[in-house]
Amino acid sequence: MHIRFAEVDEKFIKSQIEDGFYTNETELVRDAVRKMRETQERKAQFLAAVQLGMDQADRGETVAYSDDLMDQIAQRATARVAAGKPIKNPEAIGTSPKLEMDE
């Protein structure tokens, strides 16, 4: 596969290699493609989480926001960390249909 870049992009690629960020053009392109894939995956996870929330709201599975609710969530999270319990969903966007907060 041969790829042609605009002059400004070629200069950027060469500067990244000269500055030691990458050893060659192939490494830079592979990294860029990997980052694009990761971005698309995060976007898909985010959209799935939004859809999950919308579906839950449509079914009436909601809790009204309040400062007390946020305090309770923070207290549970702090207690879980203090007890050495693992974080079940570190990105707050998971593939499971329900957040596991009551454990």
Image (cartoon, grey):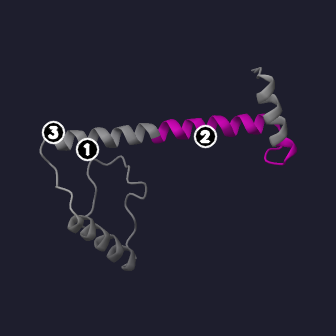
Start-end of magenta stretch: 17-42
Mark 1 is surrounded, within 10 Å at the Cα level, by few (under 14), some (14 to 19) or many (20 or more) other residues, namely some
Amino acid type, callout 3: Asp
Mark 2 is surrounded, within 10 Å at the Cα level, by few (under 14), some (14 to 19) or many (20 or more) other residues, namely few
Provide the major secondary structure of the magenta segment.
helix
Residue pictured at 47% horizontal, 42% vertical: 42
The residue wearing badge 1 is 53
Relative to 87, 101 lies left or right: left
Q: CA distance from mark 2 to mark 1?
A: 27 Å
Amino acid type, callout 1: Gly
Amino acid type, callout 2: Lys
**Which SS class for mark 2?**
helix
Mark 3 is surrounded, within 10 Å at the Cα level, by few (under 14), some (14 to 19) or many (20 or more) other residues, namely few
Q: Nearer the viewer, mark 2 or mark 3?
A: 3
| In the image, residue 32 above or below residue 77 | above
| In the image, residue 77 above or below residue 50 | below
How many labels sit on residues? Answer: 3
| In the image, residue 12 above or below residue 96 | above
Residue pictured at 28% horizontal, 55% vertical: 99
Relative to 37, 71 lies left or right: left
The residue wearing badge 2 is 35
Magenta stretch holds residue 69: no
Q: CA distance from mark 1 to mark 3?
A: 9 Å
On the image, the x and y values in percent for residue 64 come to: 17, 55
The residue wearing badge 3 is 58
On the image, the x and y values in percent for residue 95 come to: 36, 46
Q: Is residue 102 in view from this perspective?
A: no
Q: Is residue 16 in view from this perspective?
A: yes
